[in-house]
Image: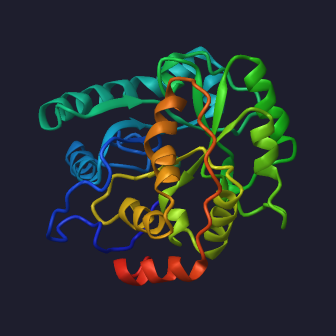
């Protein structure tokens, strides 16, 4: 999703801070230039990666949007992936020059517009094993999503549900993400959700999911534009203030690293953050919207 906010994370904002935590692994972003609604140019992507590096990210698997429909016919998939392959190669060359210590990989954010995609092409995976980032269209999910995920797992594909907190159709008790986990999916939360980037409902869902220990990893879902923020520093501040350093390391470094290797993420202890503390951090870092 795009945004239009400015703030201390935006480009040209002045001072460069030291990394907050070294070794962050980010499994969801849109940095392949000109293939989706993310970065428009290599320069934009490089600028964004520079900011990620400043915040301690050492490994990025960037994930352009792709509709599951495109996987149903080999010719269509080939046509969809060819420009991504080319643009990713050019980006990789520049990243190797500018940030030689940064690991850059590529998967896709798979839009499940059909329930039975063919996810066998390794270019769709987050790493070398079949782990795929998935979402449903329009921030709504149709009935039967746990079964769709269960069938993926049975077919040898491990789904990672992108930003579960952002769906607008959760029931009041927020039970569906638990069913996704029972089906074998792993859950990825956006940093921005926790500090209100996507509004109060997504923030409330984020706080509840963290409190239940249902979130397996954080990611930026960064769209590679100079005016967009990453929200890594804000979230780290929240976790440190509440003495949740262990959970922070699991969510930002240990678990995303395990997930891309297909290894079961470690259990994250329940994270409790009062809404008043979130509000104070918002004030400290400037307005979110
Ligand atoms: Fe995304």
Q: Residue at x 41, y 30 (%)?
A: 106
Residue 213 location (% of width, % of height)? 67, 52
Identify the image quadrant of the C terminus: bottom left
Indicate left or right for 108 with 55 as reference. right
Residue 156 location (% of width, % of height)? 69, 17
Q: Residue at x 54, y 31 (%)?
A: 259
Which residue is more in the foreground, 39 or 178?
178
Q: Residue at x 65, y 32 (%)?
A: 159
Residue 200 location (% of width, % of height)? 62, 76
Indicate left or right for 201 with 145 as reference. left
| Colour convention | rainbow
Let me know if residue 286 appears in the view. no
* Depicted 197 relative to depicted 107: above or below: below
Which residue is more in the foreground, 34 or 229?
229
Let me know if residue 76 appears in the view. yes
Residue 247 location (% of width, % of height)? 53, 51
Indicate left or right for 31 with 255 as reference. left
Residue 95: quadrant of the picture: top left
* Depicted 134 relative to depicted 268: above or below: above
Q: Residue at x 70, y 35 (%)?
A: 185
């Amino acid at each position: 999703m795009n945004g239009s906010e400015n703030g201390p994370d935006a480009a040209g904002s002045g001072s460069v801070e030291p990394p907050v935590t070294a070794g962050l692994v980010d499994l969801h972003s849109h940095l392949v230039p000109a293939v989706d609604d993310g970065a428009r140019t290599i320069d934009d992507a490089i600028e964004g990666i520079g900011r990620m590096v400043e915040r301690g990210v050492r490994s990025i698997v960037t994930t352009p949007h792709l509709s599951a429909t495109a996987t149903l016919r080999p010719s269509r998939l080939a046509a969809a992936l060819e420009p991504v392959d080319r643009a990713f190669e050019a980006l990789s060359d520049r990243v190797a020059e500018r940030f030689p210590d940064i690991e850059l990989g590529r998967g896709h954010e798979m839009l499940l517009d059909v329930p039975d995609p063919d996810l066998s092409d390794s270019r769709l995976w987050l790493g070398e094993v079949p782990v795929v980032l998935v979402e449903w269209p329009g921030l709504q999910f149709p009935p039967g999503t746990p079964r769709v995920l269960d069938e993926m797992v049975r077919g040898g594909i491990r789904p990672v549900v992108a930003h579960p907190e952002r769906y607008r159709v959760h029931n009041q008790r927020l039970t569906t993400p638990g069913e996704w986990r029972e089906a074998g999916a792993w859950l990825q939360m956006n940093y921005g959700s926790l500090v209100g980037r996507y509004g109060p409902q997504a923030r409330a869902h984020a706080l509840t999911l963290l409190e239940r220990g249902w979130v397996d990893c954080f990611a930026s879902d960064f769209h590679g534009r100079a005016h967009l923020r990453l929200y890594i520093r804000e979230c780290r501040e929240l976790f440190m203030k509440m003495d949740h350093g262990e959970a922070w390391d699991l969510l930002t470094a240990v678990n995303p690293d395990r997930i891309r290797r297909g290894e079961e993420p470690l259990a994250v202890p329940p994270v409790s953050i009062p809404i008043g503390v979130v509000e104070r951090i918002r004030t400290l870092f400037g307005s979110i919207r």
